[in-house]
Image (spheres, rainbow, N blue to C red):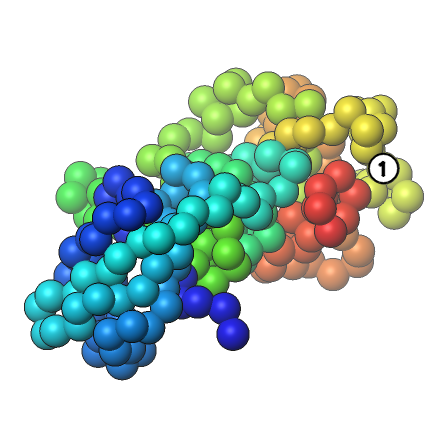
Amino acid sequence: MSNTRIYVDMPLATGEEFALGAAPANHLSNVLRMGEGAPVTLFNGSGGEYHGCLTVVRKKNVRVMLDTFSDDNNVSSLKVHLGQVMIKGERMDYALQKATELGVAEISLLISERCQVRLKGERLEKKVSHWQRVVQSACEQCQSNLVPKVNMPQTLHSWLSEREENLRWVCHPRLGGESKEQTLADKNNASAANIDSAALLIGAEGGLTEEEVELACAHQFAPQCFGPRVLRAETAPVVALSLLQMRYGDF
């Protein structure tokens, strides 16, 4: 059985003993009921992971001694930047969690015409912090040591204008008279051998407007339709990322 993996927001090094913060300490001692001597793996998102064991397990004092380091980040060779229009409730958590498990490298929260999430100030900062924790937790589970950054919300237009990835997809369920073969084709005419980065655009509930899809196409995004059924906003990134990883990544 593999060691329990915990994300910590602190510098790490081998040969040293570390006191864990309140959240990871509570998880190890009260949720998992781990005792002194139990093996544990720590990572801080900057690369690699550290292996050690718990040396002190008390109510408000959990310490770990780290003795070895592994530089395997377990990340995909395909760097995918996900542009996800914000969606309501736990569906957003699900989308970000599964995107992380499927190897996304960076996540940008987007605002579109049909976006139903409108947050400002402290509420927005708390929500983005929550989504970053969702991503960190997903990295604990999927054994990725580089934590994707969740960027603060921006407009769809500004995100599109910043894109430089050499493959760009926009998910859109209705593509007029195009055939399945055309919609799933690589519109950038690039072979798998020279694809090392991708941008993926996912709309909110109700999808993107026709004008927004046209704007994405003007920024060299290829519309992609995954079969005859319309996917939910939280399902589309799972399907699209799976196909991207199978074609160009490490699946």
At 56% from the left and 22% from the top, the residue drawn is 163
Instruction: Choose between 50 and 106: the one closer to the eye.
Output: 50
Q: Give the number of marks.
A: 1
* Relative side of 122 to 37, left or right: left
Q: Is residue 86 visible?
A: no
Q: Secondary structure at mark 1?
A: loop
* Relative side of 191 to 135, left or right: right
At 20% from the left and 53% from the top, the residue drawn is 18
Q: x and y percent of residue 142 in the render?
A: 52, 59
Q: Amino acid at mark 1?
A: Ala
Q: x and y percent of residue 198 in the render?
A: 64, 32
Residue lying at the far left in this picture: please name it.
60
Residue 119 quadrant: top left
Residue 24 quadrant: bottom left
The relative height of residue 166 versus residue 69 in the rendered view (above or below) is above
Q: Where is mark 1, residue-wise?
A: 185
Q: Residues within 10 Å of mark 1 (few under 14, many from 20)?
A: few
At 50% from the left and 50% from the top, the residue drawn is 144
Instruction: Choose between 145 and 213: the one closer to the eye.
Output: 145
